[in-house]
Image (spheres, rainbow, N blue to C red):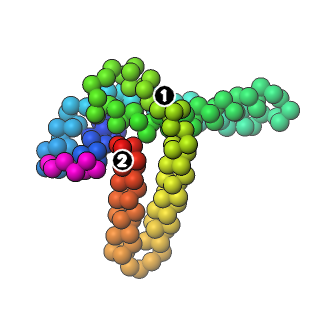
């Protein structure tokens, strides 16, 4: 389970964006130890939601087009998936920054998912573009003979990817 690691990396990126000095390995270990419980619970909830939606969306999309319940079920499933992605942008940041209970973190994440809907939509589109660029770079690394250049390209894209995520969410 990656919840604790995601929380520790979130805290490290937050400190990097805020330009707070620190020692990488010590801060990463301290962030992991202090936040692993809540972040692991958040990750477990996300895993359960991913499993439920990976069953629900194909099930409802395979239903005949004339059935109104299939269309409603698919719409609700896609809506829940979009809201869950938007809420996940904020859950880990709140878990490592604020001293809140899990219920409060999830509630506030859902509130931010709706209040910042257009910002979250723009962020998701930009992230999908970056994921596509990263996939192209990985493909190019496999095809190309110059693996060092492609590896540096992937590192640069990932740096921009994580930096953009935490810069837009932290401020």
Quarter containing the C terminus: top left
Is residue 6 in view from this perspective?
yes
Image position, residue 168 (x, y; %): 40, 47
Q: Is residue 59 a member of the stretch shown in magenta? A: no
Extent of the magenta region? 16-22
Residue at image point 38% right, 79% down: 146
Image position, residue 130 (x, y; %): 48, 59
Q: How many marks?
A: 2
| Residue underneath mark 2 | 166
Q: Residue furthest bottom?
A: 145
Q: Residues within 10 Å of mark 2 (few under 14, many from 20)?
A: many
Residue at image point 49% right, 64% down: 133
Magenta span main SS: loop
Residue at image point 83% right, 29% down: 67
Image position, residue 118 (x, y; %): 56, 43
Is residue 84 in view from this perspective?
no
The circle drawn on residue 91 is none
Q: Residues within 10 Å of mark 1 (few under 14, many from 20)?
A: some
Task: Answer left or right for 70 relative to 24.
Answer: right
| Residue underneath mark 1 | 111
- Helix or strand or loop: what does disc 1 sit on? helix
Q: Residue furthest right?
A: 66
Task: Answer left or right for 58 relative to 97.
Answer: right
Q: CA distance from mark 1 to mark 2?
A: 19 Å
């Amino acid at each position: 389970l990656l919840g604790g690691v995601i929380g520790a990396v979130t805290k490290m990126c937050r400190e990097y964006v805020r330009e707070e000095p620190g020692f990488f390995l010590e801060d990463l270990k301290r962030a992991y130890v202090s936040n692993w419980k809540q972040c692991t619970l958040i990750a477990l909830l996300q895993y359960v939601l991913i499993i439920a939606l990976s069953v629900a969306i194909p099930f409802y999309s395979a239903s005949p087009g004339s059935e109104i319940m299939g269309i409603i079920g698919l719409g609700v499933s896609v809506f829940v998936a979009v809201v869950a992605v938007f809420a996940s942008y904020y859950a880990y940041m709140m878990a490592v920054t604020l001293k809140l209970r899990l219920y409060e973190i999830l509630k506030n994440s859902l509130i931010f998912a709706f209040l910042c809907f257009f910002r979250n939509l723009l962020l998701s589109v930009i992230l999908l573009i970056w994921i596509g660029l990263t996939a192209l770079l990985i493909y190019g690394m496999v095809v190309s003979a110059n693996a060092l250049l492609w590896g540096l390209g992937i590192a640069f894209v990932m740096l921009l990817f994580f930096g953009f995520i935490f810069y837009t969410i932290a401020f």
